[in-house]
Structures are given as C-alpha cells and as structure tokens.
Amino acid sequence: MHQTNFTNIKILNMNKTALITGINGMDGSHLADLLLTKGYTVYGMERRSSSINDVNTKHIRNEITILNGDMTDQNSLLRCLKESNPDEVYNLAAQSFVGESWNTPEHTSDVTGLGVLRVLEAIREFNPKIKFYQASSSEMFGRMVENPAKETTPFYPRSPYGVAKLYGHWITKNYRESYDMFACSGILFNHESERRGIEFVTRKISDGVARIKLGLADYITLGNLDSKRDWGYAPDYVEAMWMMLQQDNPEDYVIATGETHSIRDFLTEAFNHIGIKDWTKYIKQDPRFMRPAEVDVLRGDYSLAESEMEWVPQTNFNELVKKMVDNDLELLKNA
C-alpha cells in the first residue's frame, strides 16, 4: 500500500492555519490530530451549550483554539473566520445521524444543508481565497444506480440527511464554478473509529460485544442486519480530506475501500474477536431501529483519488472492527 511521506511536514506547513467545524466529532478530532502533526495552527468551532462534549478532543484541548459558532447563524460563522483567519476551512459540522434525520428533517436540512451555504457565503465575504473542504456523504447515492459508485454516478438520496448532504455538495460545486473559489467535496463512504458515537450501529456493536465479554450485558438490540456498507477507518479518511486541499485545483473525490460488508459481517468479526462463533443468541432486533426508506448497499470506487492524489485506504475491515472492540473493552475496564 502507498505510504505518504510526511518527513519535515511541520516545516512545510508551519505557517498554515485551519478552521474545523464539528471539531468534537469523530472526523473533526482525527483531522485536528493530523493537522497538529503537520505543524498547523488549529481552530475548532463548537456550538455553545451548557455541557461541552469534548471527549474526542480532550487530549489536544491545550493545543487548539476553540471558537463558539453555530451552523444556523451566519454572523457567528463570519466571526469565527475573522478570529481564526484560516488558510483552510474543513466543514465537518452536521446533524450526522441518518436515522435521526426522519425525526428532525427541518433541523437536519438547516444545519447539514443550508449550513454549508452559510459557511461558503462567510468565506466569500471575508476572504474568497480560503480553501474549503465540504464533507459530502455516500448517503447521497442512496439507491445506487451504479455499483461501485464513482464521482460521476447519479445521486438518489433515500433520507432527509442524504438530501441535505446533496444540497451541501451541489452548493459547494456551484460556488467553485461561480466565484472561482477553491471549494471541493469529499464523498466519503462509511468510516468508523474508536471515537464513533454510541448511537451509530458500528459503535453500538463494538460496545455491546465488549459488555457481553465482560459480563455487563446479555444482548445487543439492533435494526436491519442485512444492510451492506463500504466501511473504512476514519484516520485514513481525514488524511484524504487534507490531501484534497493540497492539490493544484479543486476536485471532488470519492473516498472508500471498494469493499462491502454487511452488519452481519461486522457482528461476526466482532464476536469472533472475543471468542464467540455463534452470535445469534446475543442479538435482538427492534423495528424502531429500522429506517423508513432503507439503503441496501453502498460501495465506492476510489480510483480517481488513487490516481490523482495517490491515496489508498491503509486499514482493512478486520483491523477496523478489532480496533473498535479492543478500545471499548479498555474503556469499560477502566470505567
């Protein structure tokens, strides 16, 4: 596999500043880790609330600067730009749980869709030379009309989340072409890590398996077990985000592994890791976790990213599952 050489990268990037929206999320925190190793000055935007969820960034809190901002408030976004004066903006903030988007479609559209427009408008007003990365999603493909999906595959979103992401994707492309801005989207397929939120099925499985191993739970409650996804490892994917903004010209890229695995495959791998072969008696299915419109399969073709950026995934599916289970075992033992 290709290994990017980051020797002396701090010297190359020591004067660069980045602003990350959604810095406390899985991707935002991994991206912050990466940019700090490259010598960036890192600003992160978080929404002011009575309780700050900084579990993913606690280890770097003294190395980054946190700004208060809101994806639904144009003035706050502009103020964040003025306070950080970034060379690069990575827009990772979103209502990111697909299942929740049916319960809060208006909020999802406002934050995940229109929020992108507000960031782009703020950049255009403050400094249109800022490079902009938009976190697009494989959920935009939805009912896939081509498998694997690539950059030219038609979109068919199947959730309010997917529709909102599609608006963010197209408005990014529109601002790039209308205002000659360096604005690009990474169409990232499913990617996970030890920092994934507990409401997501992969983390629900890794946490549940760890609890069963330690005698803290008897079963895991899930929805559809037959959905197939193209799962990668988040630290590999945030490197692709950074690479996109280092290109000579802005371009949209599919970031994926090219492989699909079902929820059942994830369960098999996770339970095998703790020595359980037949996991069926540990799983209960609940209709509440079924989606109104299901996306049956998602698989991506990352060949353009490989040919133009020399990006390839570094972590395979089995390694990903083991990392997540091991991390949850460690967290529970130390709780």
Image (tube, grey):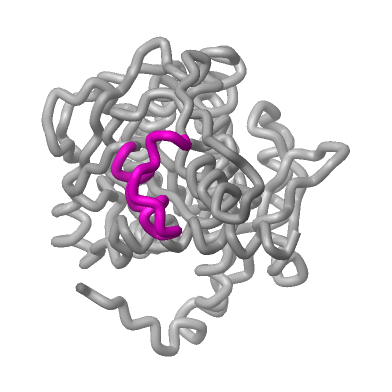
Q: Nearer the viewer, residue 7 or 203?
A: 203
Q: Is residue 251 left or right of residue 303?
A: right
Q: Position of residue 223 (x, y in %)?
A: 44, 24
Q: Nearer the viewer, residue 164 or 229?
A: 229
Q: Position of residue 85 (x, y in %)?
A: 64, 57
Would you say the magenta stretch is mainly helix, strand or loop? helix
Viewport quadrant of the N terminus: bottom left
Query: Looking at the image, can residue 18 be seen?
Result: no
**Measuring 77% from the left and 45% from the top, which residue is drawn there?**
68
**Measuring 61% from the left and 45% from the top, which residue is drawn there?**
22
**Measuring 30% from the left and 67% from the top, which residue is drawn there?**
314
Vertical position of residue 136 compared to residue 212: above or below: above
Give the tally of numbered discs: 0
Q: Is residue 318 on the magenta stretch?
A: no
Query: Looking at the image, can residue 289 be seen?
Result: yes
Q: Is residue 333 left or right of residue 29?
A: right
Residue 180: which quarter of the image? top left
Q: Which residues are magenta?
A: 264-282
Viewport quadrant of the C terminus: bottom right
